[in-house]
Image: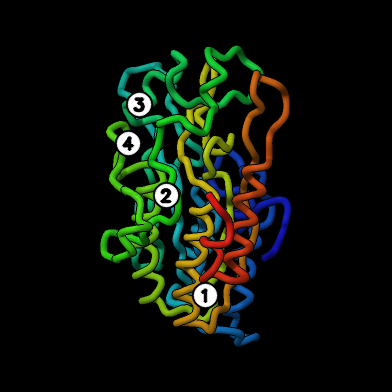
Amino acid sequence: MCIVRPPGHHAGMNGLLDGGESCGFCIFNNVAAGALHAISDERLLCERCAIVDIDVHHGNGTEEIVRKCNDPGKLFFFSIHLYDNEKKKAKSNAHQYKFYPGTGAEDDVAFNIINVGLKPLWKEPAQKTALSGTGNTHNTRGKSRQSSDSMDDSSDVGTPRDNGRFSDADSETASSAKTPNLSPRPESSTTSGRLAYRQAIQNRLLPALRAFNPDLILISAGFDAARLDVGNARHERGGERMGLDLEPEDYAWTTRKILEVADICCQGRVVSVLEGGYGRSLLGGEPGLDRSNLAECASRHLHAMVDPYDAECRFPT
């Protein structure tokens, strides 16, 4: 696992992408450079390299570099991210909202590019009352908060937190005594939140990754999809709405699923490279961020890199 700063997945071939608004704190695309180094004809380190991007933002820079590779059959790119890009209505001066960077809505199978854009939780009905104090909001700018309870972990917004282990998918069978109820809550859906995230990993990533049969897997390991991380917030007057609600155990599960494919295809060769992750807003509008949950998510990921088959059982929930 490479602990690098700054992150890199928004940096393209020449740094800032053509037409891009910013590089999203990125300067040099570490993952893409590593992938191109690995498949270089001069070095012959491997024939096929897969990049799996789990940062909450679309890896638009990595996608651009993969798309420009002179041999697209050697690279595979998967990104799971929040996607919300509202189109401005004709003859309207209304502000157009776009969750950064506003790309990653479609696949490009000719270049082995798979994009899974998840609908943000703020699009769900339960989030419509967020500013009235009954929803789950961030507050990164010290603005007044209707209720300090809005950041409590017991909030019902999003998908259920498991009390043990999630089952891998509907197609897999687990012990009925230990498998929690995975049906989404009334205010959630299978298109947003943790449940949608796990289904996308199970149904979109794993079959495609196994079919690509990589010699090496690189993970763009962003942890800003974690519950209440400011990186997945929609900033609004009075607070910020949560977009995704992953828990530390979700990162352990995701890492294990990737390692299971790696054990089959490439003798477990996986390199994880740090991308985004910020932390939670402090209660009461205090300046600064609480990074304890961010650290826990990264720790679970690292433990799963070391021992993927025990990481989910190692820590009580």
Q: What residue type is labelled 3?
A: Ala
The answer to whether residue 169 is left or right of residue 65 is: left
Residue 282 sits above or below residue 50 on the image: above
> 41 or 264: which is nearer to us?
264
Residue under numbered circle 4: 188
First along the sequence among labels 2 and 4: 2
First along the sequence among labels 1 and 2: 1
Report x, y in % for residue 86. 37, 31
Question: Disc 2, disc 3: CB below 8 Å?
Answer: no
Q: Is mark 2 on a helix, strand or loop?
A: loop
Q: Nearer the viewer, mark 2 or mark 3?
A: 3
Q: Which of marks 2 and 4 is in front?
A: 4
Report x, y in % for residue 34. 63, 70
Q: What residue type is labelled 4?
A: Ser
First along the sequence among labels 4 and 1: 1
First along the sequence among labels 2 and 3: 2
The answer to whether residue 174 is left or right of residue 249 is: left
Report x, y in % for residue 244. 46, 40
Residue under numbered circle 1: 49
Q: Is mark 3 on a helix, strand or loop?
A: helix
Specify the label residue 104 is tagged with: 2
First along the sequence among labels 3 and 4: 3
Q: How far apart are marks 3 and 4 (CA)?
A: 8 Å
Question: Disc 3, disc 4: CB below 8 Å?
Answer: yes
Residue under numbered circle 3: 126
The residue sitting at 42% across, 79% down in the picture is 213
Q: Nearer the viewer, mark 3 or mark 1?
A: 3
